[in-house]
Amino acid sequence: MDADLALIVGLGNPGPRYEGNRHNIGFLVLDELAARMNGRFKAHKSGAEVVEGRLSGHRVVLAKPRSFMNLSGGPVASAVKFFKPTTILVVHDELDLPFAALRMKLGGGDNGHNGLRSITKSLGTKDYHRLRFGVDRPSGRQDPADYVLKDFSTVERKQLALEIDRAADAAEALVTKGLEAAQNAFH
């Protein structure tokens, strides 16, 4: 069995109330990746729903924490301890990017994102990959915390499936070709 294993974590909030929220883009991208792997999410002792399989021949575990966003770190750290991945990629929403813009990086700050803050604290490091999916900032005086817990707009929903597919392509490229090649292809 090959030693390389990628853990791809999608951030979101559990339950039907949050399914279409901007904050749940990580879950939506992982649903697309699971479909590509013909996999179904199953409860795991780490506190996440997981799918194990292969993407383009590479061993991958997809994980959606069953906790709320700001407590994502516990399930992620448990999954890391259990699966011992060589690569960790976290897919999340990003207010400071226009809708559907993608950016990938290794490490960095949490930029006020409570899910990333929780993961960094639980892992004890900032050195994991991030795939940031732009959700744009709210207009006017709307609180960003309220904004990310709202569904995508009608206009955004019209192109959302295509953009989720593109984000899944980016995640797959990072796992199969590395960060630099993925950045070159998707930035």
Image (spheres, rainbow, N blue to C red):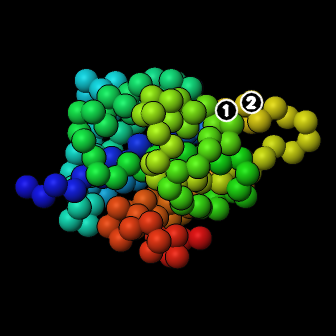
User: Could you tell me which residue is drawn at 50 percent across and 65 percent down?
Assistant: 166
**Of residues 102 and 156, which is closer to you in this image?**
102
In the rendered image, residue 156, in percent from the top left (x then y), is placed at: 68, 54
Task: Count neighbours of disc 1 (C-alpha within 10 A) and say few if under 14, some if 14 to 19, many if 20 or more.
Answer: some
In the rendered image, residue 66, in percent from the top left (x then y), is placed at: 41, 26
Q: Residue furthest front?
A: 124
Q: Amino acid at mark 2?
A: Asp
Q: Quadrant of the N terminus?
A: bottom left
In the rendered image, residue 92, in percent from the top left (x then y), is placed at: 55, 45
Q: Residue furthest right?
A: 140
Secondary structure of residue under mark 1: loop
Secondary structure of residue under mark 2: helix
Q: Which residue is mark 2?
A: 146
Figure quadrant of residue 70 = top right
Q: Is residue 64 above or below residue 5?
A: above
**Of residues 19 and 154, which is closer to you in this image?**
19
Q: Quadrant of the C terminus?
A: bottom right
Q: Is residue 186 above or below residue 72?
A: below
Q: Which residue is mark 1?
A: 149
Q: Report whether 90 appears left or right of 54.
A: right
Figure quadrant of residue 43 = top left
**Of residues 127 and 147, which is closer to you in this image?**
127
Task: Count neighbours of disc 2 (C-alpha within 10 A) and say few if under 14, some if 14 to 19, many if 20 or more.
Answer: few
User: Could you tell me which residue is drawn at 27 percent across and 46 percent down?
Assistant: 85
User: Could you tell me which residue is drawn at 29 percent across and 51 percent down?
Assistant: 86
Please indicate, yes or no, whether residue 92 appears anywhere in the rendered image: yes
Q: Report whether 138 appears left or right of 70.
A: right
User: Could you tell me which residue is drawn at 81 percent across and 32 percent down?
Assistant: 143
Figure quadrant of residue 84 = top left
Q: Which mark is residue 177?
A: none
**How far is the residue under mark 1 from the one under mark 2?**
5 Å
> Decide: marks 1, 2 in contact (CB < 8 A)?
yes
